Structure formats: structure tokens, C-alpha cells
Image (tube, rainbow, N blue to C red):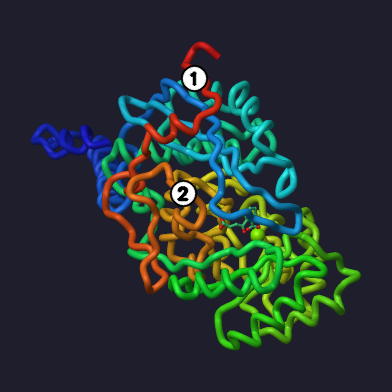
């Protein structure tokens, strides 16, 4: 649109017929609209600039032992099997992490479904022709139903590459504004309440701004009693990972006695409506995690009063573009969101940090320091949380964290590369 504008400004425009001049004016108006548009998006550069060609996708499985086991209402794990993807586009490399678990317990997707889904469907779709930007991936993948964590791994790698290509921070490309983000911790079910108290003590001393504990029948009210007896005022929440049913409503009402910031996903993972029934009889805010798979779900949940807070996990909703939409829906409903975690390596963690800079991420996320999970994380620097419980946001291009390919290589147990045109 710039070319017509400069020619319209030339002398040859004068002396043309009325109609030609009217058309010229119209073109001028349109072109200055676009010029103005570019100026308005200066903080969000790169819109309608260049395209990207994804030349190859590399899939790797890494295995990393956790520093401490992690137990939820669906089981305990000691180490992680993580799928990493990297994409090559016009000489830059972008990284993404698939947050699917080792088992199909948190979600139907798991490590072994993600690999062939990416290999046979998503990677070939991604390499078909050019892309404008990371935000175009969702439409590319639309024909494949579900498999959101696999889609997110690829889409986020493209956003990562796009930010590096444009030499701007990923958080800015996403539309973030925060220069530091607040951190909480998620503490799993332990062998004993004493062990749990010890963990909480450590995390409070480290400065974390919100403690979340995992609960299930038999490890809930008794544990909350013990915690509140010791720390009456800390910001505390619980996550049930769908461990209860509506028959336990009287039991769940007893959680109201503990001044909790929220109760996360108390009921079925695939239910929203029944949470609205529960929310009506609880004072404690319900936060939905597993139930929210996209922005429509969030809109529905908020419209019927199924929750007062939403946990956004970029993998669960299928990538950064859908996560942004969920964020925008919640802002419209004036309810806060926070960024959930999936025991990510540094690559997924860095992406969670970038997402958490969006305005409506108003509560501390499950975005905590690398050293809580790993003896050695695969990024440099590792994610560090300051003594005031905040993570400082880097101004460096991309995520601001460098992927340590030597360590990735050391932890890799299988690897495969797919190239454009060879699907
Ligand atoms: O429900 O938030 C959850 C970990 C795996 C699966 C589900 C959940 C979690 C966590 C851990 O709570 C959060 C973290 O990464 O620290
Ligand atoms: Mg949860």
C-alpha cells in the first residue's frame, strides 16, 4: 500500500478528472490508514511484514529425573519424559515443549500419542507453504481434532522462531506488558503431613507468594488444619485434579473454613456446568484447569458462574494464540487468570514466563525456579525467582533464555527430523 501513496503524492495526480481524483483520494485515505496501522503496532512489530518458511521440524524425547517426586490425585512420578520440538525457519531455530504427561491421566494426550501426531499430521501441515506468523498455526492445524498439547509444542516453537527472527522479546510479540511476574508453587502430596510442612517452610523462605497443595479424599481437610495451625495468614490454595464428585458437596463446603484463595478443579475434568452448581454453594472461589480447553469454554464457564478464576496452560488450550484468546475472554469478564505449570523443562518454563506478562495474569502462577525441578535445567540462565517471589523479565530477543543444546543432547533418548516436501 505504500507504493500507491507515494505516486499519489506526485504532480501527475493534478489535472486528472474528478472521478480519478476521487479514486485517488480514496486510495490515499486507505493507504494512510495502513501507514497509521503500522505506526500503531510499533509495540507489536512485525505484523504484516514478512513470511516464514518452516524448513524442518525436529522431534526429540528427553528424559530427566525430578529433584523430588511429584504426586497428584492421579499418581506419583519420579522423572519426566518430555518431547521437545525445534523448527528451522529462514536460518533461525525456535524451540517448543510438548507438555503431555507420561500417562493419559491429566489429559487424554500423553508422550506416546504426541510423537506420531506431530510426525504424521502436524509437522507436514506446518511445512506446507509459508506462514505469516506463529498466530497462523492454529488455522493450519484446525483439521486435526484435539491433540492440543502437540499443536502447542509446534505453534510455540514458531512464535519462538518469529521473535528471534524479528529480534524482539517473545513477551512483547505476545502483547505482554509486565516487567516482572509473581510466582507461586505447587506442592504435591507427600508421604506425611510433616514432610509437607517442611516443603512449605522451604518455599515460604524462598519468597514464593502463594502456596498451592494437591488434595484428594483423605489428604485434604486434615492437612489444611495442620497448615493453618502453623501459618494462619499465608496465601494458600488447593488443587484436586478432579478428585471429587458433587455427592461430596457437604465435604467440599468444609474447605470454606480455611480462607483459601481458590479450589482448583474439584470435579470432573470434562465438566463445566456442575462446577457452577458447586460454586453456588461455596464461598471459596473455584478455579478451572482441566475443564477449559479453549476460549469458548472459558466464556461459557464465566457466563454460567462455574468459576471465579481460570488457570491458563498454554499446552492445554493448544498454543499461544488460543491462550491469548482465553486471556482476553477472562479480561472481558473481569476475572483474573494465572499461568499453570506442567513440570516443564526450561523451554516450556520460559514460554510460560513470556505468557505471564499479559495484563490479566493477575495472580501468582505455578511458574517457579528451575532448581525446584531439575538438578540441571536445559536453559541458560536457569529460571531464578528473586527473594521477593518475582521473576524479572528479560529484554533480550526471543525468550531471553538460551537453549543448552549440549544438555538436550545428553538427555535425548530418541530424535527424528522431518523436512518440507518429504512428508
Ligand atoms: O493440575 O496444575 C496441575 C503438574 C502436572 C499436571 C497437572 C498439574 C501440575 C502441577 C504442577 O500442579 C505445576 C508445576 O509445574 O509446578
Ligand atoms: Mg491444576
Ligand 2 rendered quadrant: bottom right
Q: Mark 2 points at which residue?
A: 375
Q: Position of residue 396 (x, y in %)?
A: 27, 49
Q: Does the residue labelled 2 lie within 8 Å of ligand 1?
A: no
x and y percent of residue 350 in the render? 42, 50
Which image quadrant for residue 259? bottom right
Numbered disc 1: secondary structure: strand
Secondary structure of the residue carrying numbered label 2: loop
Q: Give how far across and how far down residue 264 sits, in percent.
A: 68, 66
Callout 1–callout 2 Cβ contact below 8 Å? no
Dividing the picture into quarters, in which one does residue 409 lie? top left
Residue drawn at x 56%, y 72% is 200
Dot 1: within a 10 Å radius of its alpha carbon, few (fewer than 14), some, or many (20 or more) residues? some
Of badges 1 and 2, nearer the viewer stands 2
**Does residue 331 appear left or right of residue 26 in this picture?**
right
Q: Judge from the rendering whether residue 337 lies leftward or rightward of residue 170; answer left or right.
A: right
Front-lying residue, 3 or 20: 3
The residue positioned 58% from the left and 46% from the top of the image is: 315
Q: If the image is split into quadrants, where does the C terminus sit?
A: top right
Q: Residue 417 carries which label?
A: 1
Which residue does the image show at 39% across and 68% down from the upper left?
390
**Residue 131, quarter of picture:** top left
Amino acid at each position: 500500500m505504500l507504493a500507491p501513496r507515494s505516486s499519489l503524492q506526485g504532480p501527475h495526480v493534478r489535472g486528472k478528472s474528478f472521478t480519478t481524483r476521487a479514486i485517488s483520494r480514496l486510495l490515499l485515505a486507505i493507504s494512510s490508514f495502513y501507514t497509521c496501522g503500522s505506526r500503531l503496532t510499533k509495540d507489536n512489530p512485525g505484523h504484516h511484514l514478512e513470511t516464514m518458511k518452516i524448513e524442518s521440524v525436529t522431534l526429540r524425547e528427553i528424559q530427566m529425573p525430578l529433584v523430588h517426586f511429584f504426586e497428584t490425585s492421579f499418581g506419583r512420578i519420579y522423572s519426566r519424559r518430555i518431547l521437545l520440538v525445534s523448527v528451522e525457519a529462514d536460518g533461525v531455530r525456535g524451540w517448543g515443549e510438548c507438555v503431555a504427561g507420561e500417562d493419559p491421566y491429566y489429559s487424554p494426550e500423553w508422550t506416546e500419542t504426541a510423537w506420531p501426531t506431530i510426525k504424521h499430521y502436524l509437522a507436514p501441515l506446518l511445512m506446507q507453504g509459508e506462514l505469516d506468523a506463529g498466530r497462523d498455526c492454529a488455522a493450519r492445524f484446525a483439521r486435526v481434532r484435539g491433540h492440543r498439547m502437540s499443536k502447542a509444542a509446534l505453534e510455540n516453537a514458531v512464535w519462538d522462531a518469529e521473535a528471534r527472527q524479528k529480534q524482539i522479546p517473545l513477551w512483547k510479540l505476545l502483547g505482554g506488558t509486565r516487567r516482572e511476574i509473581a510466582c507461586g508453587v505447587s506442592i504435591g502430596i507427600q508421604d506425611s503431613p510433616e514432610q509437607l510442612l517442611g516443603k512449605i517452610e522451604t518455599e515460604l523462605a524462598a519468597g514464593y507468594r502463594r502456596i498451592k497443595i494437591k488434595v484428594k479424599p483423605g489428604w485434604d481437610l486434615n492437612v489444611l488444619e495442620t497448615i493453618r495451625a502453623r501459618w494462619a495468614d499465608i496465601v494458600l490454595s488447593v488443587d484436586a485434579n478432579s478428585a471429587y464428585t458433587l455427592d461430596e458437596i457437604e465435604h467440599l463446603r468444609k474447605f470454606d473454613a480455611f480462607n483459601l484463595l481458590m479450589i482448583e478443579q474439584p470435579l470432573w475434568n470434562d465438566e463445566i456446568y456442575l462446577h457452577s452448581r458447586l460454586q453456588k454453594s461455596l464461598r471459596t472461589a473455584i478455579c478451572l484447569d482441566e475443564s477449559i480447553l479453549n476460549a469458548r469454554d472459558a466464556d461459557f464457564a464465566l457466563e454460567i458462574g462455574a468459576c471465579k478464576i481460570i488457570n491458563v496452560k498454554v499446552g492445554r488450550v493448544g498454543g499461544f494464540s488460543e491462550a491469548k484468546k482465553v486471556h482476553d475472554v477472562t479480561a472481558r469478564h473481569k476475572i483474573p487468570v494465572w499461568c499453570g505449570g506442567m513440570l516443564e523443562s526450561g523451554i516450556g518454563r520460559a514460554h510460560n514466563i513470556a505468557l505471564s506478562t499479559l495484563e490479566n495474569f493477575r495472580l501468582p502462577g505455578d511458574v517457579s525456579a528451575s532448581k525446584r525441578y531439575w538438578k540441571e535445567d536445559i536453559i541458560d540462565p536457569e529460571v531464578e525467582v528473586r527473594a521477593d517471589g518475582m521473576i524479572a523479565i528479560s529484554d533480550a530477543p526471543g525468550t531471553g533464555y538460551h537453549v543448552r543444546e549440549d544438555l538436550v543432547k545428553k538427555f535425548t533418548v530418541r530424535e527424528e527430523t522431518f523436512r518440507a516436501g518429504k512428508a
